[in-house]
Image (spheres, rainbow, N blue to C red):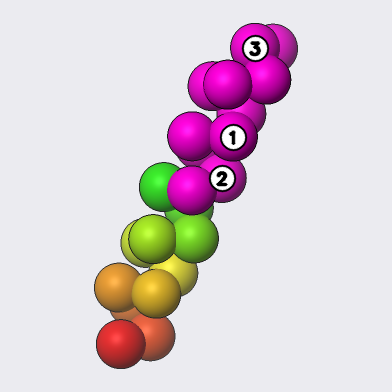
Amino acid sequence: VDKKKAYVLILVYIAQMKKFYF
């Protein structure tokens, strides 16, 4: 797994979580 892809995936995941809570 590419580290950059994993990093972006985590950022997207966090963004979605923030969008969900707020």
Q: Position of residue 11 (x, y in %)?
A: 49, 48
The magenta region covers 1-11
Residue labelled with disc 2 = 10
Q: Is 4 part of what is drawn in magenta?
A: yes
Q: Is residue 8 left or right of residue 6?
A: left
Mark 2: few/some/many CA within 10 Å (<14, 14-19, 20+): few
- Residue sitting at the far top: 2
Give the alpha-carbon distance from disc 3 to disc 1, as whole Å.
Answer: 9 Å
Which residue is depicted at the point 41% across and 47% down? 12
Q: Position of residue 6 (x, y in %)?
A: 61, 29
Looking at marks 3 and 1 on the same chain, the residue that comes earlier in the sequence is marked by 3
Give the alpha-carbon distance from disc 1 to disc 2, as whole Å.
Answer: 5 Å
Give the alpha-carbon distance from disc 3 to disc 2, as whole Å.
Answer: 12 Å
Which residue is depicted at the point 54% across and 21% down? 5
- Picture layout, residue 9 above or below residue 1: below
Mark 1: few/some/many CA within 10 Å (<14, 14-19, 20+): few
Residue 1: quarter of image: top right
Residue labelled with disc 3 = 2
Q: Is 6 part of what is drawn in magenta?
A: yes
- Kind of residue sitting beneath label 1: Tyr
- Picture layout, residue 20 above or below residue 7: below
Q: Position of residue 22 (x, y in %)?
A: 30, 87
Q: Of helix, strand and loop, which one carries label 3? A: loop
Q: Of helix, strand and loop, which one carries label 2? A: helix
Which residue is depicted at the point 50% across and 36% down? 9
Residue labelled with disc 1 = 7
